[in-house]
Amino acid sequence: MKKPGKIISKPRGRLFYDDLCEAELSETEVFKTLANNLQVGICILQNKQFQFVNLHMQEYTGYSEAEMLVMDPLSIVHPSDKRMVVKNAINMLKGMQVSPYQYRLITKQGDTRWIMETVMPIMFKGKRAILGNSMDITEQKETKESLQEFDALKASILDAIPQAVVGLHNRQINFANTAVKEVFGWQPEELIGKSVTVFYRDEKEAEEIARHFYTTLEHQRTFASEFRCRRKDGRDILCRMRSSRVGETLRERRIVATYEDITEQRRAEQELANSREQLRNLSAHLQSVRELESTRIAREIHDELGQSLTALQLDLAWLGNHLPSGDQSLAGKIQRMRNLLDTSIDSVHRISTELRPTLLDDLGLTAAMEWQIQQFQSRTCVKCEAQLNCPDNSVEKDLATALFRIFQETLTNIARHANATLMKVRLDRKDDELRLYVFDNGKGITQEQIDDPTSFGIMGIRERVNLWGGSVSIKGKPQKGTTIKVRVPMSKGEK
């Protein structure tokens, strides 16, 4: 029996095979069997040619062993990595490098794979050779690159968010985006490791906010509220804070929180609300002045002009009774004057009533609406059905005027636009609230018409309803009509 090959252990874990060429054929087969069962690539190179390639290396390169034995080993290396591979391999063979190197390999199918490799010098068949040990790390490389891309994406997303975003671990800040500079005046790197209390006005207030937030986050994933905060420069701001715990439970108080400075937004909202309130008060004043002026004009027309026309009517009656008998021409003239006076008196009565119905002041809302319905029906020939279930003495004068004007506007819209043949109206009082319902079977109002900023009739209805703290609903269906529902509290202070 021949003496088996001698294995010598060298520093840095390298193995040198002294006399492989003298080994028995069975030992070579054992080596190949072992190599082919490894989950790493094993190859032997000699004179710049592959002498052995195990199955795993054949698998990830796509080449058979027979193909690789006649190939230039560098031909499967990515062109951009060839120089680097040669340099690292030489350094490792000289003992100048111990860590594996990585490079790209081009498979037989043309795919690119990432390889991590080490090499060591050996003796093969009595000659110097290189033992290569490699691993396909493509999936790990892609996973690492994906994680890096994901981390870069997260950083970009955080920096793109206009609100300040901070991560907290037991109330200590462990990350912050660039928006903390705009919201709080801090640089992100200044906040790392600091307590979140730097965002609040004092320690006591910070503890109260923390108790409130953490107690809530123990029972739900997210929470949002508004708190007073303090910038680095000492200026107080109002922030909308939203937080979410990290994980399914509030473990070690790990949360992500966002802070949005809403100071100017709240100030603008308050100014807008004040402006709207002033406009409503002005509108209410103008409507009151207009109603008073209409009442005054209606009274003057009725009293002054009406009395003068009545006096003329009496004078014409006297003159007709004292005409010489047989003067038919003059009698006809007087009769025509009487007819003209009667028409004028009717016009005066109609105009004064339209300016301010005396029924509204004398008999109340229900009587005024009944009169208006009769006038509408006789003028338009639209059939009207009314259910007015509200005692006249239960509605104060200003509210009665507002509802009557709203009702007048709905009738005007029906007459002008609806092409209806039927109108239904119902007025009820329920739970200290007046409810007015008006329906017509016309062509139906469209949403564009409802939202039209030049639809002053609808705007007037809404404004009158808003002045009383009520609500209005206007809905139309094509060729099926329009429904208007108005709900108004009995007094302005009730809602």
Image (cartoon, rainbow, N blue to C red):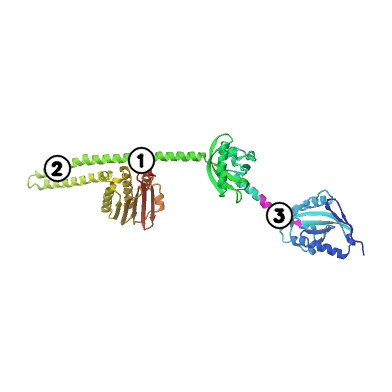
Q: Alpha-carbon distance for marks 2 and 3?
A: 113 Å
Q: Residues within 10 Å of mark 1 (few under 14, many from 20)?
A: some
Q: Is residue 162 visible?
A: no
Callout in the foreground (2, 1): 1
Question: Circle 2 — which element?
Answer: helix
State whether the magenta stretch is mostly helix, strand or loop.
Answer: helix
Q: Say few, some or many: other residues with alpha carbon within 10 Å of mark 2 (under 14 / 14 to 19 / 20 or more).
A: few
- Report crowding for label 3: few under 14, some 14 to 19, many 20 or more residues within 10 A (C-alpha): few
Where is residue 423? Give x, y as percent: 31, 55
3 versus 153 height, above or below:
below
In the displayed structure image, the side of residue 73 where residue 168 appears, left or right: left
Question: Could you tell whether 3 is left or right of 34 in the image?
Answer: right
Determine if the magenta segment contains residue 226: no
Q: Nearer the viewer, residue 2 or 416?
A: 2
Quadrant location of the C terminus in the rendered image: top left
**Residue under the image location 80 percent in, 64 percent down:** 66
Amino acid at dot 2: Leu
**What residue sits right under mark 1 in the picture?**
284
Quick check: can you spot residue 32? yes
Instruction: Tell me whether the residue at label 2 lies in contact with that at label 3, contact meaning CB atoms closer than 8 angstroms.
Output: no
Instruction: Place residue 1 in its image quadrant.
Output: bottom right
Q: Residue at x 18, y 46 (%)?
A: 342
* Tag 3 secondary structure: helix
Given residues 177 and 435, the one toward you in this image is: 435
- Whichever of callouts 2 and 3 sits on the residue coming sooner in the sequence is 3
Indicate the position of residue 95 as horizontal and vertical percent values.
84, 49
Residue designated by label 3 = 140
Q: Position of residue 50 (x, y in %)?
A: 82, 60
Task: State how far apart marks 1 and 3 are (Cα).
Answer: 74 Å
Is 145 one of the magenta-colored residues? Answer: yes
